[in-house]
Amino acid sequence: MNEPLTMTLWNAILPLAGLCALVVWLPGWMAGRGNLSRARLSRAVGVTALVALVVGAGLAAGLYAAIKEGVWAVVLKAPLERAGFFLGRSALFALLWGPVLGSVWLVKAQELNRRLGERMVDGEGGMG
């Protein structure tokens, strides 16, 4: 496999778009639709970041395996060392999905504050 590596739809763009879609969808699913707790939203965003790192490491391993033979054999020989390597590569993916997750957190927090404000105006209390 000596052909030059080029970034294509299948080996880079779609996997990274999928990772971004995960960080857009997962916090809302974990926190719940009508969430009124800032702590719950923060936990959902934190867990999403950890999940994205792990999924990104798997994605990096898969992409490396696609361009170089024997990657899985090396991973099986030294799993902890290779896991650290792929988690490091996954951290580079965070340059893409990190701002997306930050934007999602901001939007979800604004929605939460709007719902809390509406509850206070309606006289139901609302500090969650």
Image: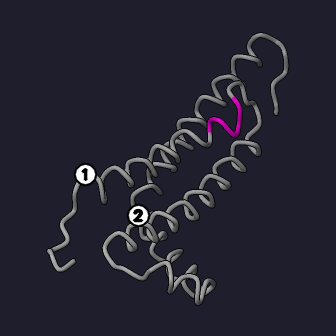
Question: Mark 2: which secondary structure?
Answer: helix
Judging from the image, the colouring scheme is: one colour
* Mark seen at residue 95: 2
Q: How far apart in space, not on screen, are marks 1 and 2 (Cα)?
A: 19 Å
Identify which residue is drawn at 57% across, 79% down: 83
**The quadrant where residue 7 appears:** bottom left
Whether the magenta-drawn stretch holds residue 31 is answered as yes
The structure residue drawn at horizontal position 58% and vertical position 33%, both measured from the top left corner, is 110
Q: Amino acid at mark 1?
A: Leu
Question: Which quarter of the rendering shows the N terminus?
Answer: bottom left
Residue 116 in picture, x, y percent from top left: 72, 25
| Image coords of residue 47 (percent x, y) | 67, 54
Q: Quadrant of the C terminus?
A: top right
In depth, the one of 6 and 66 nearer the eye is 66
Q: Quadrant of residue 33?
A: top right
In the visual, does 88 lie left or right of 39? left
Count of marks overlaid on the render: 2
Residue 111, image x, y percentages: 60, 28
Q: Is residue 68 above or below residue 121?
A: below
Using the image, tell me which numbered label, if any, was put on residue 9.
Answer: 1
Residue 95 position by quadrant: bottom left
Marker disc for residue 52: none
Amino acid carrying mark 2 in the image: Leu
